Structures are given as structure tokens and as C-alpha cells.
Image: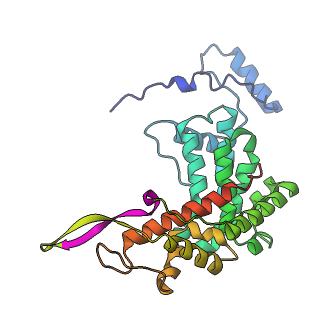
Amino acid sequence: MHPIPRLPFFADMFSLPQPIPQKTPKDEKSDSVEASSSLSSDQVIPVGENSLVLDRVLRYIYPSCEPQPWFDVADIVPVLRIMLKYQMEQSTPFKRIIESLLSRPLELDESGTSAQTPIVTMGVIGVFYLFKDSLNREWLERAAKLALRIPLKTLTGPLQCSQLEYLSARAYLDLLEYHKKCSEAIRSRSLPTWSEASDLVYECTTGAATNGSRVPASAMLNSDEPRNCLDYLRGWYKELPYTCVEWSSMAVLVSQGYCQGCSVCGQTPCPNRFRAVFRLIKDEVEAAVLTVPVPL
């Protein structure tokens, strides 16, 4: 058995003004009995939250307690409300919840349940708009960029997402306009020649065959290779060009023969060379998105 330390974090947790619960005749009778009793009792502090939500919050904050997993975005909204009420937005648990919200749509895609991604994504965006006055700009920008992973025709269609009510009509239209401008910025971006050696050098860890063993070595991309690959991807994913930031989008380049052989290992495609191309493509797509102001 180990003693659980008292945390100074909770010292003034209940010092904020709390709503006074309305008393029923039964409560008033109980109060008179307690007042006349000479027995001492623990102090009871009225709060406006129910025990279930408070339990969830405390499990996030208190050490050695494992928070219950959440499967619906709606489950996390009351938790965030309480944490913001008690000024916990700078705490590690609060940041962990925010990061879990931002990663949930990506986890769905990776798990093969992408059919739910648009609904969950808009739910996450709705939550961020609900608390946008209390969240930092970086989180809001990342939340808005989640919409770029959804086709525009899906965003403009009917979505059964209750968190959409957190967005005003203006905020929703601004998000659609942001999607359009980002997609256009990606499609129309003038690409560099990548002539700098530092941009084109990659490390082939497979290595060249030398005396029966393979020795890793550096090699260089052709400057036209990443540009030609991105041009093809932008045409292939013209309805959703932000898809180019996903590693899975590179598969179409393999099937269409856009892979050059590696001068070190001799493989076509070489995983290390291909990842170097992907890095340059992703950087260019993200740079194009940064030219569009995020609606906040």
C-alpha cells in the first residue's frame, strides 16, 4: 500500500462561485434536523456538475487513475467544460484530451473505418469552435485543417452530426470557403526546381552490396522527380488535393510507374528514395495551405 499524496492543484478548486441548488421542503426539514444535531459531519460543497462527469475529470487529473475511454465526441464536451471552468487548460491532462480529439479522425482512417471519418471530423471541429475562445491558435488551425481531408461535396451534403450546432452559419460557410481556397492553392502552386543539394539528398539504409554485405550510403534525387510526382498526384486527387500529404497516396505513383531506381541499392522502388520524394511533396502541399488564412 502506498499513501496517495494530496495535490496542491485541488487546493482552491471549489473556491469559484457555484450555483445554489434549489431546496425542496424535504431538504429544508433535513437541514433543520442537521442543525439541531450535536454530531459533527463533513463539509458538503454544492457544485453544478453531476458525479459522473466529475469522476471522469478527476480520473484524467489524478495520478494512478486511468480515465475511461471515450467513443463519442459528445462524451468529452462536458469534461472540457469543467476543465475550462476550473482553469485547467494549461494542464497536461487537458492538452492530452485536445490531442486525442485532433487525432481521432486520423485513427479512424488508419483502422479502416473511414466511413465514419466525416461525421467524427465535423464533430471534432464543432467542439473546437465551441471552445475556440479558450483554445490556442495552433489547435484551432489543426482542427480546421482536418476538414481538408473530407471531399467538399461531402461537407456540403447532409451530415448526421449533433456537434454541427456549435458552428454558426457564418462559421460553417467560412470553413467551406477555407476548403475551396486551400484546394485551389495546392492545385495552382508553382513548384520549385529543388536544385539545392540538401533538399534532394537522401540516405539509403538498404545500402549497396559490398563484399557480401550491404553498406548504407547517400544518394540524390533527380530534381524533376518530386515535381513530376506531385503534378501527377494533384491531377489524380483533383477533388481532394490535400490527400497528397498522406503516405498512402504515394501508392498510385508505384502503379503508374513514377518510381526511379535507387543508385545505391538498385531497387525500384527504393523505400528510402520514395520517402524522400514524399517528404518534399508533403512540404509543398503544407506550404500551399499556409498561404490561406484559417477561419477562426
- Quadrant in which residue 152 is drawn: bottom right
- Quadrant in which residue 83 is drawn: top right
Q: Which residue, as the protein is rendered here, is positioned at the far bottom?
A: 256
Q: Which residues are magenta?
A: 197-209
Residue 163 screen position, x and y as percent: 75, 57
| Residue at the spot 70% in from the left edge and 76% down from the top edge | 239
| Residue at the spot 76% in from the left edge and 60% down from the top edge | 178
| Residue at the spot 40% in from the left edge and 70% down from the top edge | 273
Residue 249 screen position, x and y as percent: 54, 74
Q: Is residue 147 visible?
A: yes
- Quadrant in which residue 263 is drawn: bottom left
Q: 187 or 65, which lies in front?
A: 187
Residue 28 screen position, x and y as percent: 79, 26
Q: 115 or 73, which lies in front?
A: 115
Q: Would you say residue 211 sits in the magenta stretch? A: no
Q: How is the image coloured?
A: rainbow
Q: Is residue 4 found left or right of 111 in the rendered image?
A: left
| Residue at the spot 68% in from the left edge and 46% down from the top edge | 78
Above or below, 174 relative to 210: above
Q: Which residue, as the protein is rendered here, is positioned at the far top?
A: 38
Q: 70 or 154, which lies in front?
A: 154
Q: 87 or 19, which lies in front?
A: 87
Q: Would you say residue 198 sits in the magenta stretch? A: yes
Q: Is residue 107 visible?
A: no
Above or below, 8 relative to 178: above
SS majority, magenta = strand
Residue 4 screen position, x and y as percent: 42, 29
Q: Quadrant of the N terminus?
A: top left
Q: Which residue, as the protein is rendered here, is positioned at the far left?
A: 211
